[in-house]
Amino acid sequence: MSNILTMKKIFLYIAPLLILASCAKNLDDYNYDQKNPAVVPAGALFSNALKALSDNVTTPSVNTNVFRFWVQQWTATTYQDEPQYDFVTRNIPQSFWGAFYRDVLMDLQESKRIATEDEEVEEAVRNNQIACTEIAAIYAWSGMVNTWGDLPYTQALNIEENGQPSYDDAATIYADLLSRLDAAIALINTGEAGFGDADLLYDGDMAGWLKFAHSLKLRMAITLADVNPAEAQAIISASASLAFTSNADNASFAYKTATPNNNPVSNALNPAFTSRRDYVGGKPFIDELNSLNDPRRPFFFTTINGAYVGGGIGASNEFALTSSPSNKVIAPDFEALLMDYSEVEFILAEAAERWGMGSAATHYNNAIEASITYWGGTSSQAAAYLAQPSVAYATASDNWKEKIGIQKWIALYNRGFDAWVEWKRLDYPQLSPASGAVTPNIPYRLTYPPSEYTLNETNVNGAVSKLGADDVSHKIFWDVN
């Protein structure tokens, strides 16, 4: 009996050890910091980069993105620094620069590296993932060139080896980006998966990414039209039929109703998120909408006693007496557009004017109808709008840049950054500088951020010497008119 008891005691000691031994290989599961993982999946980094990219070009924060003010779609009620082009006080160049480099491009580079090294993923899927990271990065890089001109590029994202990265010529960067875009397109297999639900633009649909890539090629090509027309024409000719063909193809980022995944516009304007009342519609923009009886007005702005009333640019405005962005625009789950079908059709209308590629009027009409129906209007409203002599392509103006430029300005509503680039490029609409402006002209570029003068002094000074001065009056290389 005593032997049996002794054996039972021994078993009671040994059993837990056996259990622990059998589970030892799983103990690491309990030693995992989910908030600070040692390895981050490529898809998670890709998602984060896409959100950061969308936030950076969409936010109306006066600390980061003030381009809606500069193209006079919006203006401010009380604080006029940013509508008057004072972007030094809040260090806007630093914020915009940092968000691109740190939050977008670094994550995309790491996502691409991890995807490239992942041998457990089929080659076709891996190639699709690499293509997605490249297309998103090219979108970001091209936006940065359009903002600053020369930039740290080839050495920019490897701080360990290049603590003080050199500046590359803006035109050279653009040429390389177009080559990279061709390489990314060649990698895409529309019959295979990509990033799946980590893809916050197309939910893993590679056919959507392929159209987006060709549409981005059109945008970049038309940007070069005044400095390299032959190349621009060739690119557009090759990609026109492969780009967006309807609003269903749009590169749109779907925000959610709750923070932190809500549309950043809602943070600045929606009463559920803020009590501030700082933004109203700009008078030049709303006056143009009123003069054209534009059917998009109720989707763009609120009314004041049944009328659409714009605020002075650079002047104090009373919120209660001025139209403000509509409930649609300030909704927390209102999507952001990185690029849309309307923009593609405007590009093709311009290509038709420049090089006889199709009917400019047909593409112009398609662009306007696409914009009106996207915002919630009807095809019959679009037809009536286009029938007006002040809108119809044949009679709106003798200057194709003017009629395309004004309508593109309207269609790019709530996309202040893209509208600013197009205003610089087409020189329409003809906008007057803000009242009390601190510079003689609406800015053509942002100045380099202070961090570059602190951490990369030699190289930024070299870039500035090429300009003559680091100021807002210097145009980007493609802006020659």
Image (cartoon, rainbow, N blue to C red):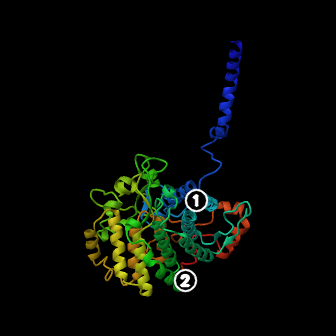
**What is the x, y in percent for residue 420?**
48, 69
Q: Which residue is drawn at 33% across and 57% down?
A: 302
Amino acid bearing label 1: Val
**What is the x, y in percent for residue 199?**
50, 58
Q: Which residue is drawn at 62% across and 62% down?
A: 116
Numbered badge on residue 227: 2
Q: Can residue 392 be seen in this view?
A: yes
Instruction: Name the one closer to the observer, 248 or 57.
Output: 248
Name the element at disc 1. Answer: loop
Q: Is residue 324 visible?
A: no
Q: Which residue is drawn at 44% across and 73% down?
A: 243
Numbered badge on residue 456: none
Q: Do the residues labelled 2 and 1 touch (CB within 8 Å)?
A: no
Between disc 2 and disc 1, whose residue precedes?
A: 1
Name the element at disc 2. Answer: loop
CA gap, disc 2 and disc 1? 42 Å
Amino acid bearing label 2: Val
Q: Is residue 263 left or right of residue 373?
A: right
Numbered badge on residue 121: 1
Name the quadrant containing residue 369: bottom left
Instruction: Name the one closer to the observer, 115 or 76.
Output: 115
**What is the x, y in percent for residue 73?**
42, 64
**What is the x, y in percent for residue 50?**
52, 59
Which is closer to the viewer, label 2 or label 1? 1
